[in-house]
Amino acid sequence: MLSKRFDIGFLVSGLIVQVVVYWLAPTHWLSLVSGLLGITSVILCSQGNIWTFAFGFGQILTYSGLCWIERFYAGLLMNAFYFLSQIYGIYAWQRQRTGDSVVIVPRSLQLNRFVLLCTIVAVVSVGVGWLLNRYTDDPQPYLDAVTTVVSIVAQVMLVMAIRQQWWLWLFVDVLFVAMWIMAGNWSMVAQYGFWCINCVYGMLRWKDLATA
């Protein structure tokens, strides 16, 4: 079981990484702000802490600005969905809290349902990628499509407090690392690289929360 000291240390290390990378390879100032808010939000999510949504709103707004700059149009649609899901997420997580606690209790999805869900996500991603490739000037249409569709599904699972969300986030965060490397934004590469590590952290923390 992970300790509170480890939780705090993990958060601080993530913030330090984001600041150092921005200092070494500065880009748009939104990259730094979005990265700091995003790292705080996902780590609080890993801890099952409802305050994740407060930082999530700020990360959504700043990241949307970056998507507009890079012409990642599917990413803009994804963030519009994120914004609405954040509002519902506060309500859903409030209902799952026990007493005065700010922490929720996760639940699991059956394996056959999770496999079916992944299959549907793959098919939809290809379709969205084809539309972006044909009708927009998106420089990375299929990668943009996959990251968007998977992220939306993972966000729904997050709101529903389903543990398998972390496998989807890990998959999509690896793709986001590749996407932002090609875009040349190293602050975002650092954010999503750290988010990959956070997915493993989230798996362990949510396992603890589910058995607490």
Image (tube, helix red, strand yellow):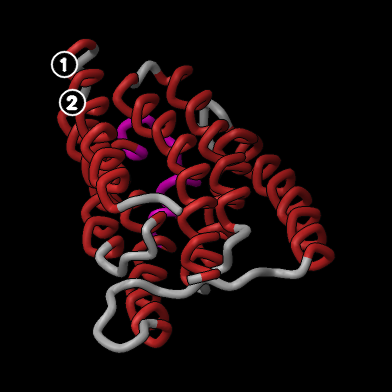
Please state if 98 lies on the left or on the right of 19 as rendered. right
Dot 1 crowding, Cα within 10 Å, few <14, some 14–19, many 20+: few
Near mark 2 (Cα within 10 A), the count class, few <14, some 14-19 or many ≥20, is some
- Which of 203 and 25 lies nearest the eye of the viewer? 203
The percent coordinates of residue 151 (x first, y second) are 53, 51
Q: Does the magenta portion include 29?
A: no
Name the side, left or right, on which 47 lies relative to 40: right
Q: Position of residue 32 (x, y in %)?
A: 20, 32
Secondary structure mostly seen in the magenta stretch: helix
Mark 1 and 2 residues: CB-CB less than 8 Å, in contact?
yes
**Residue displayed at 56% across by 66% down:** 157
Q: Position of residue 21 (x, y in %)?
A: 25, 18
Q: Nearer the viewer, residue 19 or 142?
A: 19
Question: The N terminus lies in which quarter of the figure?
Answer: bottom left
Between 10 and 96, the one lying in front of the other is: 10
Lateral position of residue 49 relative to residue 211, left or right? left
Amino acid type, callout 1:
Trp
Is 68 a magenta residue? Answer: yes
Snapshot quadrant of residue 99 = bottom left
User: Quick check: 199 above or below 138?
Assistant: below
Q: Residue at x 45, y 18 (%)?
A: 181
> Label 2: which residue?
19
Q: Which residues are magenta?
A: 67-80
Badge 1 element: helix
Instruction: Tell me the kind of residue under disc 2.
Output: Val
Give the labeled residue for mark 1. 23
